[in-house]
Amino acid sequence: MRSDTPGLRPPFIASRLIGLFTSGWHDDAISGDLLEEFSDVAAKSGLTYARRWYCWQSIKTIGNLIGAGLRTAPWLIASTVIGGYLLLAFGSSLPESLIVAVLQLRWHHVIPYYTQREMDAHVFWLNTGIQIGHLLVSLFIGCIVAAVAKAREMIATLALSISLLALSVVGWCNFARHWPERALPIVFIELVGIILIPMGGVLVRELRRVTRARRSSA
Amino acid sequence: MILGQDARPAAIGVAIGIASSLAITRLVSSLLFGISGTDPLTFIGLAVLLSFVCASRILHSGAPCHARRSPDCITAPGSPLTTVNLSYIVYEMSKREYLGEFEHIVLLAVLRLGREAYGVTVRQEIEARTGREVSIGAVYATLDRLEAKGYVQSRAGDPTPQRGGRSKRFFNITGRGSAAVNRTQQALRSMIKGLDFVARYS
């Protein structure tokens, strides 16, 4: 995104965020309108004020677009959120089962562990490997939810993420009361997993945008 | 009162039905097992069910009300606000699709701007005339809703360099949109009429 005046560019993150929540002709119309007004505001009140104005307008516009998306397709969003939650409930144990199965196979049937290095690798996969697996599952489920939600990728994945966060906060409080010393790393990993769900939405969204751009240029 | 007038034939029908059923049960009583031919619960239950169906039909059709009394009569000052009248008013309102406050403002802005109505100009027009700060997202969310209702039509403009090569989306009001604006204006005028609004609240 660029305007006609050199160096007069809106904040990159804000303009990218707007692009994530708009689709079809909305993308051209909303992003173009914001850019047009940004140029006018910058000419009248200066670049700093214009950039601040653009960020604030982007935040409000994203809020409006989320609200409109929820109003126009409430059942689609609700079903994708429930579907995503069920996938997470069933899929979260998969990395653990897979890694444990592979380690067991290696331990019993292939080569026994003789060295400290091999033991360290075993422990690494059991701890960090499972956690990385959980995060990858979250990202993958975010991608599935986004793919099902079609043009509302970000709204569906954000709705799933926010509902999971609300449920998790209750669990974290309970966990922290009983095991305060272990709460922080668990909360951190789960929080990253929750953040990765909308990241899946971003991936699908960008993939679709690139595909559409290639098709239109072809 | 309306329900009473319209429900009279229904009540007569239910009474005739019960009498006929009592007579016919003598013929079919030999075919019934585990229940008597004159089971009071079945008779009362069916009568209540049929009465409920008739009542809901009368409330939702609106036709008998039109035939006997005009809607103006129901909504006129001094008319009793009975449950039936209220249901009728709500039904009529949902049928007429009045505009929401912001929808009304956006449609008036589109009307004022004519062929130059697109996101930026609509937003600026609203801000200039109402002093109310609105986001471009709010304007487009409302224009989308209005387009879905058939109140506005949109067309793509040419891309301009000032917009980073992105095209504008122009909007114009349709006949249905004009009718909705008139209807809402009329409703507002009739609600304000006689209130001495300006003197009292300004």
Image: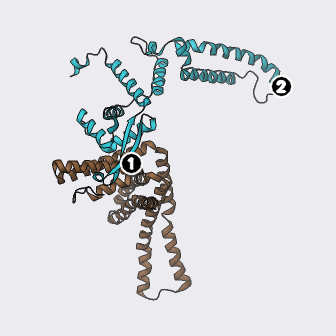
State the separation of the CA atoms marked 2 and 1.
71 Å
Q: Nearer the viewer, residue A176 or A189?
A: A189
User: Residue drawn at (44%, 79%), measured in percent from left and top?
Assistant: A122
Q: Which chain is brown?
A: A
Mark 2 or 1: in front is 1
Color used for chain B? cyan
Q: Is residue A140 above or below residue B45?
A: below
Q: How is the image coloured?
A: by chain
Identify the residue position indicated by label 1 in the image: A26
Q: Residues within 10 Å of mark 2 (few under 14, many from 20)?
A: few
Q: Nearer the viewer, residue B127 or A89?
A: B127
Q: How many labels, in total? A: 2
Q: Is residue A106 above or below residue B202?
A: below
Q: Please state the horizontal and vertical placement of residue A98, each as a whole percent of the image.
A: 51, 72
User: Residue drawn at (54%, 23%), measured in percent from left and top?
Assistant: B60
Q: Is residue A133 above or below residue A8?
A: below
Q: Amino acid at mark 1?
A: His
Residue B30 visible in the shown view? yes
User: Which mark identifies residue B30?
Assistant: 2
Q: Residues within 10 Å of mark 1 (few under 14, many from 20)?
A: some
Q: Please state the horizontal and vertical placement of residue B170, each as a whole percent of the image.
A: 36, 41
Q: Are marks 2 and 1 in contact (CB under 8 Å)?
A: no
Find the residue positioned furthest to the bottom: A114
Q: Is residue B159 above or below residue B123?
A: below
Q: Please state the horizontal and vertical placement of residue A74, each as a whole percent of the image.
A: 46, 44
Q: Quadrant of residue B59?
A: top right
User: Residue drawn at (42%, 66%), measured in percent from left and top?
Assistant: A135
In the figure, is residue B34 to the left or right of B128?
right
The chain ID associated with circle 2 is: B
The chain ID associated with circle 1 is: A
In the figure, is residue B24 to the left or right of B173?
right
Q: Amino acid at mark 2?
A: Ser
